[in-house]
Amino acid sequence: MKKVFFALGLLPLLAACANTAQGKLHQAVYDVDSAYHVLANPMPDVMAGKVPGVALTDAQKDIAKRASQTLFNEISSLETSIEAGSSITQTAVSALQTDFASFETCWAGLKTGTTPDSCATIGGSK
């Protein structure tokens, strides 16, 4: 029971860490990472043709894979920096957020049969 109260007592200290500029940037990266995994979760089923009403061409599958990999690499790079204790910049986090928005638009378009310009923006080509 003492351990529970001790752990609860540490929560304000942990929350204080996220109040620093770096803490907020770290949290933004983790938020994008979580959103990416939610968005990308159905990709294997879509690619395999298991989602009714969604049929991607081979070219669209290639675009989706490249765009997804580009975003994943960007997230991984920032998370590696965070884990190494290196500072990350607002510019890098803003670029990540912009690329996530492009990926989200690209993926949504591909699933409806179009190939939005945002696919090229994130590295998926068009």
Image (spheres, rainbow, N blue to C red):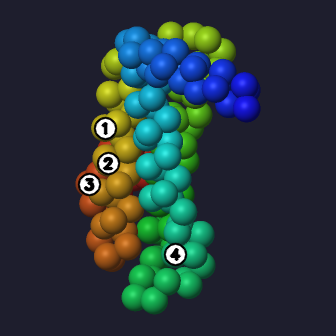
Mark 3 crowdedness (10 Å alpha carbons): few <14, some 14-19, many ≥20: some
The mark that comes first in sequence, 2 or 4, is: 4
Q: Secondary structure beneath disc 2? A: helix
Q: Quadrant of residue 109 in the image?
A: bottom left
Instruction: Name the amino acid, label 4.
Output: Val
Circle 3 — which element? loop
Measure how far apart labels 2 and 4 are at the Cα level.
Answer: 19 Å
Residue type at mark 3: give it. Asp
Residue 17: percent from the left, percent from the top?
Answer: 48, 15
* Tag 2–tag 1 contact (CB < 8 Å): yes
Mark earlier in primary sequence (3, 2): 2
CB within 8 Å, label 3 to label 2 = no
Amino acid carrying label 1: it is Thr
Residue underneath mark 3: 117
Mark 1 sits on what residue? 98
Using the image as rendered, state which of residue 109 and residue 58 is in the foreground.
109
The nearer-to-camera label among 4 and 3 is 4
Indicate the amino acid at tag 2.
Ser
